[in-house]
């Protein structure tokens, strides 16, 4: 399909640009990793998702890999990252996840704190409950970002 000049959009227009979203927790091994994955799954074409930790563990928790495998996402290719690994510039949204005073400042137009418990020591059924809560919250965030672009 060819767009006429009157229907073409400016690629620099915020309405058409992907919203950069960063999910931040302490270790970047569970919560923020799963949130980044769900943002990629449910926000394709809407968001550009990143995750990082204030004190990264250096590895993604195998329980998180297993939990995400249950929804068809391969988290084993992710790595635990520091906020210093985030691309420079302002994010549309920064979501902190239970790091409290340890959450570093990352420039953002909007920010939220999601009080989600760290599931690293939880049994599989409770870990899955946390995973599902994260998915629900990410879907809601994607809906809000999509609505704001209209």
Image (cartoon, helix red, strand yellow):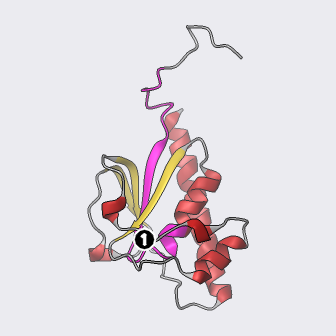
Is 24 magenta? The answer is yes
Q: How many labels does the image show?
A: 1
Residue found at x 47% / y 20% = 10
Horizontal side of 122 relative to 125 (left or right) equals left
Picture coordinates of residue 67, whole percent (x, y): 66, 77
Q: Report the span colored magenta.
A: 10-33
Q: How crowded is mark 1: few (under 14 residues within 10 Å), some or many (20 or more)?
A: many
Give the labeled residue for mark 1: 97
Residue found at x 59% / y 82% = 62
Above or below: residue 108 compared with residue 29: above
Horizontal side of 46 relative to 83 (left or right) equals right
Residue found at x 63% / y 86% = 126
Picture coordinates of residue 108, whole percent (x, y): 32, 50
Question: Considering the image in quadrants, where does the N terminus appear?
Answer: top right
- The one nearer the camera, 112 or 21, is 21
Horizontal side of 98 relative to 84 (left or right) equals right
- The one nearer the camera, 138 or 24, is 24
Picture coordinates of residue 112, whole percent (x, y): 39, 60
Above or below: residue 150 compared with residue 106: above
Above or below: residue 60 compared with residue 81: below
Give the quadrant of residue 114: bottom left
- The one nearer the camera, 61 or 23, is 61
- The one nearer the camera, 63 or 142, is 63
Is 2 magenta? The answer is no
Give the quadrant of residue 51: bottom left
Picture coordinates of residue 102, whole percent (x, y): 28, 75
Residue found at x 52% / y 46% = 47
């Amino acid at each position: 399909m060819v767009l006429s000049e009157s229907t073409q959009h400016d690629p620099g227009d915020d309405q058409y640009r992907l919203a950069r979203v960063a999910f931040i927790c302490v270790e970047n091994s569970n919560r923020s990793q799963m949130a980044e994955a769900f943002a990629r799954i449910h926000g394709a074409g809407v968001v550009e998702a990143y995750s990082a930790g204030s004190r990264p563990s250096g590895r993604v928790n195998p329980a998180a890999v297993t939990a995400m495998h249950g929804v068809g996402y391969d988290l084993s290719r992710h790595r635990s990252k520091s906020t210093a690994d985030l691309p420079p510039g302002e994010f549309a949204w920064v979501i902190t996840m239970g790091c409290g005073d340890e959450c570093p400042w990352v420039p953002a137009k909007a920010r939220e704190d999601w009080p989600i418990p760290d599931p690293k020591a939880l049994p599989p059924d409770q870990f899955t409950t946390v995973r599902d809560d994260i998915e629900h919250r990410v879907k809601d965030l994607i809906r809000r970002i999509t609505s704001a672009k209209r």
